[in-house]
Amino acid sequence: MRIGYLRVQDNSESKNVHTEVVEKLNVEKAFVEKTDQENDESPQLMKALEYLRTGDVFVVKEFAEIASSMAELLSIVRKLAQKQVGFVSLKEKIDTSLPDGGAVLGQVGLAAAGVG
């Protein structure tokens, strides 16, 4: 199952944000985080990560949706891999459920760390 997560501004005018997220991310279920700039908590992200099961694919619009640093992102992706859950970031065109996806993500991590 493809599970999506998206952060939206709390003042979002759309009444159908959930439906829009499902369509935008091409997922079957979505967790939507309504945020404001003063609050960094992400309870919907935690719910999404807990909801994922073996064989699922976790889809985000971009890395920044779920992590504020490459180390944090790689930690989340490792946890997903331990659960045998794929990870897709649409903006960065990363898909760990594909044969080369994990390797590409590892290279991005090395580049961000200044290695290689």
Image: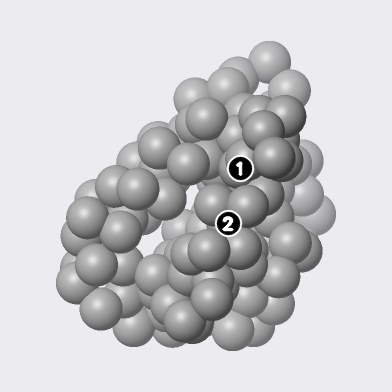
Instruction: Say whether marks 1 and 2 touch (CB < 8 Å).
Output: yes
37 up-or-down from 22: above or below = above
48 left or right, relative to 37: left
- Within 10 Å of disc 1 (Cα), the crowding (few <14, some 14-19, many 20+) is some
Q: Residue furthest top?
A: 38
Secondary element at image label 1: helix
Q: Quadrant of the C terminus?
A: top right
x 39%, y 70%: residue: 86
x 42%, y 50%: residue: 77
Looking at the rendered structure, which numbered label has been put on residue 105?
Answer: 2
State the separation of the CA atoms marked 1 and 2: 6 Å
Q: Which residue is mark 1?
A: 109
11 up-or-down from 36: above or below = below
Callout 2 amino acid: Leu
34 left or right, relative to 92: left
Could you say which quadrant of the image residue 62 lies in? bottom right
